[in-house]
């Protein structure tokens, strides 16, 4: 989970950097890139957490933990997407 949230944060930071470097003609393209990378990272991290179940002796107990952590990943991803959208507002657009 710790490494997964770090990877999500990295994708978010890269997206912000691309938005900051974009000009009005490329801003929308960079925004779409940033969203896609955050959304992909969320899917990957949820799948990675799910893979823990393959090693679990007590899948019911561990499954509850995995679901809770996947929900946390979803919330982090949604917060990153909202922040990307908010970051777009003051930037010059074509």
Image (cartoon, grey):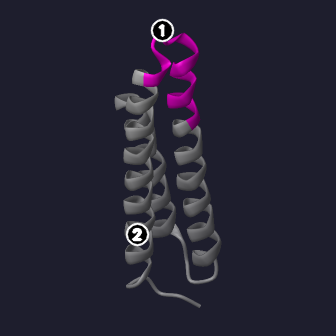
Contact between marks 1 and 2 (CB within 8 A): the answer is: no
Residue 77 percent across, percent down from the top left = 44, 54
Name the residue located 34 percent from the left edge and 30 percent from the top edge: 2
Residue to which mark 2 is pinned: 82
Instruction: Write the start and end of the magenta stretch as one range.
Output: 47-60
Residue 3 percent across, percent down from the top left = 40, 29
Residue 25 percent across, percent down from the top left = 63, 82
- Magenta stretch containing residue 55, yes or no? yes
Q: Quadrant of residue 91?
A: bottom left
4 up-or-down from 43: above or below: above
Residue to which mark 1 is pinned: 57
Local packing at callout 1 (Cα closer than 10 Å; few below 14, some 14-19, many 20+) is: few
- Magenta stretch containing residue 52, yes or no? yes
Name the residue located 42 percent from the left edge and 22 percent from the top edge: 62
Front residue of 33/18: it is 33
Q: Quadrant of residue 47?
A: top right
Name the residue located 37 percent from the left edge and 46 percent from the top edge: 72
Magenta highlight: main SS: helix
The circle on residue 38 is none
Local packing at callout 2 (Cα closer than 10 Å; few below 14, some 14-19, many 20+) is: few
């Amino acid at each position: 989970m710790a490494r997964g949230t770090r990877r999500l944060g990295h994708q978010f930071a890269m997206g912000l950097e691309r938005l900051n470097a974009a000009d009005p003609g490329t801003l929308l393209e960079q925004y779409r890139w940033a969203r896609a990378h955050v959304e992909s990272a969320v899917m990957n991290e949820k799948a990675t957490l799910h893979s823990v179940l393959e090693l679990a002796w007590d899948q019911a107990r561990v499954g509850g933990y995995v679901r809770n952590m996947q929900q946390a990943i979803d919330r982090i991803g949604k917060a990153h997407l909202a922040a990307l959208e908010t970051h777009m507002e003051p930037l010059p657009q074509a």
